[in-house]
Image (cartoon, helix red, strand yellow):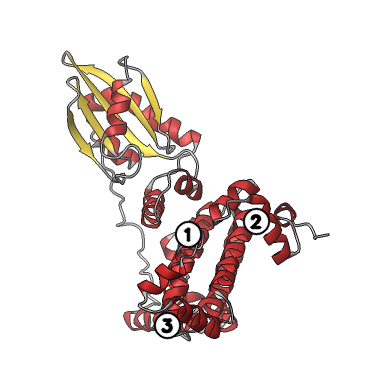
């Protein structure tokens, strides 16, 4: 319990018979991740051959653990703490490499947000604490309590400038501003949304929660903002898969930001991009059939469209489905899918270090050369030129 209180990491104690006799888990690893349950803990235990020796363990997901064995009363005991990260994980790469579903990717993001990222110095300090475990067991320190003598010191009562009524009014104002802000985003009005955030700072101030940690405070603000924007976009009938993708992208950028100014700029960019998504992708103006077709193609843009199966799902004829879609969107099914593929290609070229071949396969093209030709026709640049920011020939 002492170790857990000091480190705030999951703590496990195993006896010499490989039995887990104590554990305190702050974080539960999902079943789809390596190391779920106690598998990582027992793996580390099985590889610890010496007592009095600190061991460090890392699995394929970059989850780290410390282990230390000691003898007490002629019995061997092992204490293990973890997991932690030694650097912020690349969630997009992990999701891709392990073929995670959208739900699993979201669970991975949520669990990763809870796992501590320790610097080398912090990890070394935790390891040192673990090595002192036997000394901690043997010592129970009782501090000498010193009470300040205030009898000779004049007491100045701090004036309360912020009474309950004023606090209640501020809360009301925050909720009103939040409602107005979300309404602006739902209409795609980026100008009004930006003005509301810039002029009504009390909505996202919360400086009292982290007065000495401006970077952490702004990251929390950005997380709140991302949630409000995501909800607003969904209220405008933007397809869920598109909201998920933009939300995941910004969640990653928030956690990896290391400057206050970067986070300020990110907030404005989030508002603008969500408003653009609402304007471009709101389904509320389309008939039910076209909405379902668009949502289906957005979800499976990297798969070949089977019009017969799609029409059967909607209890209509393939020709009728194609004709109505073209009437409402001014695009064929294939053109709509190609637009989605090109948009995703542009994003991946800037966000991921992928070869053109890898990228082509990811977005649904079996022939990388054909993908490159289509991309140049759409953008005027080859994929490599677009990644490097070069002008086309």
Q: Position of residue 290 (x, y in %)?
A: 45, 80
Q: CA distance from mark 3 to mark 1?
A: 23 Å
The relative height of residue 21 versus residue 195 in the rendered view (above or below) is: above
How packed is label 1: few (under 14 Cα within 10 Å), some, or many (20 or more)? Answer: some
Please tell me which residue is depicted at 73% across the width and 53% down the height of the picture: 388
How packed is label 3: few (under 14 Cα within 10 Å), some, or many (20 or more)? Answer: few
Q: CA distance from mark 2 to mark 1?
A: 26 Å
Q: Position of residue 381 (x, y in %)?
A: 75, 60
Q: Viewer-proximal residue, 96 or 73?
A: 96
Local SS, label 3: helix
The relative height of residue 341 versus residue 129 in the rendered view (above or below) is: below
| Residue 142 visible from this viewpoint | yes
Q: CA distance from mark 3 to mark 2?
A: 43 Å
Residue most toward the right? 393
Which residue in the structure is indicated by mark 1? 248
- Judged by depth in the image, the label closer to the viewer, 3 or 1, is 1
Q: Which mark is residue 270?
A: none
Which residue in the structure is indicated by mark 2? 371
- Judged by depth in the image, the label closer to the viewer, 3 or 2, is 2
Local SS, label 1: helix
Q: Earlier in the sequence, mark 2 or mark 1?
A: 1
Which residue in the structure is indicated by mark 3? 179
CB of mark 2 within 8 Å of CB of mark 1?
no
């Amino acid at each position: 319990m002492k170790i857990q209180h000091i480190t705030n990491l999951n703590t496990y104690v195993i006896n010499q018979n490989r039995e887990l006799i104590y554990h305190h888990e702050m974080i539960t690893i999902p079943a789809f991740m390596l190391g779920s349950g106690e598998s990582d803990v027992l793996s580390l235990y099985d590889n610890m051959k010496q007592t009095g020796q600190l061991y460090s363990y890392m699995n394929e997901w970059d989850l780290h653990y410390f282990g230390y064995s000691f003898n007490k009363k002629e019995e061997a005991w092992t204490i293990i703490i973890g997991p932690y990260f030694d650097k912020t994980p690349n969630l997009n790469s992990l999701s891709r490499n392990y073929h995670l579903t959208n739900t699993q990717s979201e669970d991975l993001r949520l669990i990763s947000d809870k796992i501590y990222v320790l610097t080398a110095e912090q990890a070394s300090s935790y390891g040192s604490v673990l090595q002192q475990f036997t000394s901690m067991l043997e010592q129970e320190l009782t501090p000498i309590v010193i009470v300040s003598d205030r009898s000779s010191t004049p007491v100045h009562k701090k004036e309360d400038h912020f009474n309950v009524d004023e606090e209640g009014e501020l809360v009301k104002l925050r909720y009103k501003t939040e409602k107005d802000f979300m309404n602006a985003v739902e209409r795609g009005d980026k100008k009004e949304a930006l003005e509301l955030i810039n002029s009504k700072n009390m909505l996202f101030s919360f400086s009292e929660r982290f007065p000495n940690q401006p970077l952490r405070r702004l990251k929390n603000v950005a997380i709140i903002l991302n949630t409000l924007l995501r909800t607003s976009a969904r209220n405008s009938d933007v397809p869920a898969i598109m909201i998920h993708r933009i939300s995941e992208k910004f969640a990653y950028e928030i956690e990896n930001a290391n400057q206050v100014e970067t986070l300020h700029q990110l907030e404005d960019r989030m508002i603008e991009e969500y408003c653009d998504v609402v304007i471009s992708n709101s389904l509320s103006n389309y008939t039910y059939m076209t909405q379902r077709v668009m949502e289906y193609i957005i979800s499976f843009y990297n798969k070949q469209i089977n019009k017969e199966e799609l029409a059967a799902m909607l209890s209509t004829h393939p020709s009728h489905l194609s004709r109505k879609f073209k009437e409402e969107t001014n695009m064929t099914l294939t053109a709509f899918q190609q637009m989605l593929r090109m948009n995703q290609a542009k994003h991946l070229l800037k966000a991921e270090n992928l070869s053109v071949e890898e990228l082509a396969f990811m977005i649904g093209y079996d022939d990388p050369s054909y993908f490159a030709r289509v991309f140049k026709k759409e953008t005027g640049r080859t994929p490599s030129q677009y990644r490097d920011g070069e002008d086309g020939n």
